[in-house]
Amino acid sequence: MSKLDFIAFDADDTLWHNERHFKFTQKMFVELLGNYAGHDHIHARLQAAERKNLKFYGFGIKGFTLSMIETAIELTDGKVEGRTIAKLLDQGREMLNHPVELLPGARETLELLHKDYKILLITKGDLVDQQRKVASSTLSHLFHSVEIVADKTPETYISIFKKHGSTPERGLMAGNSLKSDVIPMLQAGGFGIHVPHELIWDYEHEETPHQHERFFEVKNVTETVPLVHKLSMNE
């Protein structure tokens, strides 16, 4: 009998690319407003706006777009041109329409684990956008359930596993963010597997909990398969 009832995965930058679209747009934004301030200052102001606005707009592209517009207005003392605002809106829509690009090994990993385990997808962000990406990924049939949440906290994981008749102690969460995917799951009592990605949003940086007995780190998503099998075995 397996010690694990559910295997949960993050979506963005764990199963498919996401952050690189934000990085590209951030670069465009900094260059667009380069006549008003230095690049580092513009980047810092945008980051500050994003953090401030999380409680109003939540995570995702729509909130990011609104934060760009707000930053543009503030940096230019309200003198930003309408065509600049229009360009930011266009770029936001382009991000929302961007095709889903799976990370190497994502599909194979889920297909292998799907044979023996119930798999959850737990992702945070804008409901409509996340639903679009899940549908476009062509991976939805491999998930027992898709959970789109406003944020990831220990309480979030406890609630999700309770909903499915289990507890985090009998679950595992794999993702690229220590702050959102791994540490809250550890705090809830579950296993946390860090799957690093070369790009990560500054907000998601956190100290690695190397000493935690339920923390593990792999080089890529495919390495979760043998680790899951090992952790699911009875002692």
Image (cartoon, helix red, strand yellow):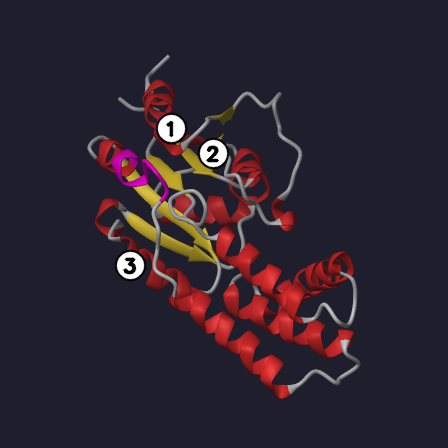
Query: Is residue 5 left or right of 150 when viewed as pictured?
Result: left
Q: Residue at x 34, y 23 (%)?
A: 232
Residue for badge 3: 136
Indicate the amino acid at tag 2: Val
Q: Distance between the residues labelled 3 and 1?
A: 23 Å
Q: Does the magenta stretch include residue 23?
A: no
Is mark 1 in CB contact (under 8 Å) with mark 2? yes
Q: Distance between the residues labelled 2 and 3?
A: 22 Å
Residue for badge 2: 195
Say which label, 2 or 3, has the lower sequence index: 3
Q: Which residue is drawn at 35% across and 62% down?
A: 131
Indicate the amino acid at tag 1: Thr
Of badges 3 and 1, nearer the viewer stands 3
Residue for badge 1: 224
Q: Of helix, strand and loop, which one carries label 1?
A: helix
Give the class, few, some or many, for how many residues have Cα within 10 Å of label 2's Cα (few <14, many ≥20): many
